[in-house]
Image (cartoon, helix red, strand yellow):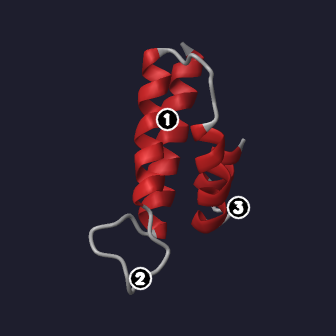
Amino acid sequence: MLLQLLARNRISADEFEVLFLPLYKNDSTKWPQETYRVLDQLFYAVHDYNRDPLLRDNDVDENELHNRAALAFSELRQLAAK
């Protein structure tokens, strides 16, 4: 799972951004509301991610994106266990 790779620092935030955004934007799955909420929050974190520290203002940095990915992964696992 792509999210798990980022949450466990197996891929960089840059790699995750390149792979995740098109997957999310082109996904037509009708997710349950709780799942969609988690994925949507992650999308906005990835969208706000800025890899260039010189251009970063209040954007999400790599560390913050890893933290948000770990949180999303945990929340999705909890939802799957229900």
The count of marks equals: 3
Q: Callout 3: helix, strand or loop?
A: loop
For the C terminus, give its image quadrant.
Answer: top right
Q: Which residue is mark 1?
A: 39
Q: Which numbered disc flags the more N-terminal residue, 2 or 3?
A: 3
Q: For this rendering, which residue is in front, 72 or 26?
A: 26
Q: For this rendering, which residue is in front, 25 or 76?
A: 25
Q: Nearer the viewer, mark 1 or mark 3?
A: 1
Q: Which residue is mark 2?
A: 53
Q: Callout 1: helix, strand or loop?
A: helix
Q: For this rendering, which residue is in front, 72 or 54?
A: 54
For badge 1, the amino acid type reads Leu
Q: Which residue is mark 3?
A: 10
Q: Is residue 45 above or below residue 9?
A: above
Q: Quadrant of residue 59?
A: bottom left
Q: Quadrant of residue 9?
A: bottom right
For the N terminus, give its image quadrant.
Answer: top right
Q: Give me the C-alpha separation between circle 2 and circle 1.
A: 25 Å
Residue 48: horizontal and vertical position, in percent?
39, 59
Q: Give me the C-alpha separation between circle 2 and circle 3.
A: 21 Å
Q: Callout 2: helix, strand or loop?
A: loop
For badge 3, the amino acid type reads Arg
Q: Is residue 57 left or right of residue 77?
A: left
Which residue is painted at 59% across and 58% down in the image?
17
For badge 2, the amino acid type reads Pro
Q: Is residue 64 above or below residue 28?
A: below
Residues packed near mark 1 inside 10 Å, few (<14), some (14 to 19) or many (20 plus): some
Q: Which numbered disc flags the more N-terminal residue, 1 or 3?
A: 3
Which residue is painted at 41% across and 62% down in the image?
64
Rendered image: mark on residue 26: none
Q: Is residue 11 above or below residue 75?
A: below
